Amino acid sequence: MSKNNSTTREVQQPTILSYVKDIPNLLSLSGLACTLLAIYFSIRGLYGAAMIGMVWAVAFDWADGLVARKLKGRTATDAKFGGQLDVLIDIVSYGVTPAILLLSYGNFQPIYLLGAFIMIAAAAIRLSYFSTYGLAGGTKYTGLALDNNSLILVSIFLLEGIVSHGTFSIILYMSGVGLAILNVSEIKTPKLSGNPRNVYLLGAYTLGITAIYGLQLISN
């Protein structure tokens, strides 16, 4: 009887929601909330608010990894669960969200479906490749890391009020597809989030982007 009880305790798994209290996972879910807001505001046509959501999603994504590396007492299973959660959120944040942004800005016309599909497909392939092979040489990504897509797009979107709608539609389309091509290319790019200096730079960039688009929203 005691042997059976011991076996039961050994195979007992933690509850699903027990992982929510893990701080890195809470940060990941906060990033997902920002992503949801970005999708919502993109569909509503409030692109300034969508840009703020997109850049904060990246900030929380970087924060969860930074905290996870510094937090003591996390088990290998905690790390594995967090990694899986991170990948699933990344496909939404860096694949689905930019695709919806493109579709919305193009008034959901069919021609934009191709670009949106390329962006989502590239994100899915890129993440699957990374999950399989990890960092090249342990230090660099193969292909442009997906978080760069959002960081670049929120800057490109600053042109939206400068050029005509039609011109910017072309710029956004080409930028999204171009980034997707870089995502699945063989170029080697450093892991920016692993450098503390880059984390501070991202913090400044996030606050700057928030201020710029926040002022635009207030003025409109």
Image (tube, rainbow, N blue to C red):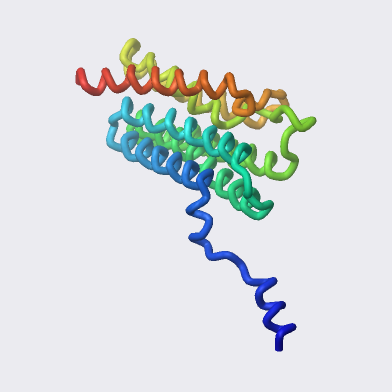
Where 32 falls versus 168 (above or below)?
below
* Position of residue 43 in the picture relative to residue 99 (left or right): left
Q: Position of residue 110 (x, y in %)?
A: 41, 37
* Position of residue 185 in the picture relative to residue 114 (left or right): right
**Residue shown at 32% from the left, 25% from the top:** 48
Nearest to the observer: residue 112 or residue 128 = 128
Where 1 falls versus 118 (above or below)?
below
**Residue shown at 79% from the left, 30% from the top:** 137
Residue positioned most to the right: 137
User: Residue 199 falls in which quadrant of the image?
Assistant: top right
**Residue shown at 59% from the left, 23% from the top:** 196
In the rendered image, the quadrant that contains the N terminus is bottom right
Q: Position of residue 5 (x, y in %)?
A: 67, 81
Nearest to the observer: residue 152 or residue 2 = 2
**Residue shown at 72% from the left, 38% from the top:** 134
Nearest to the observer: residue 181 or residue 56 = 56
Nearest to the observer: residue 149 or residue 84 = 84
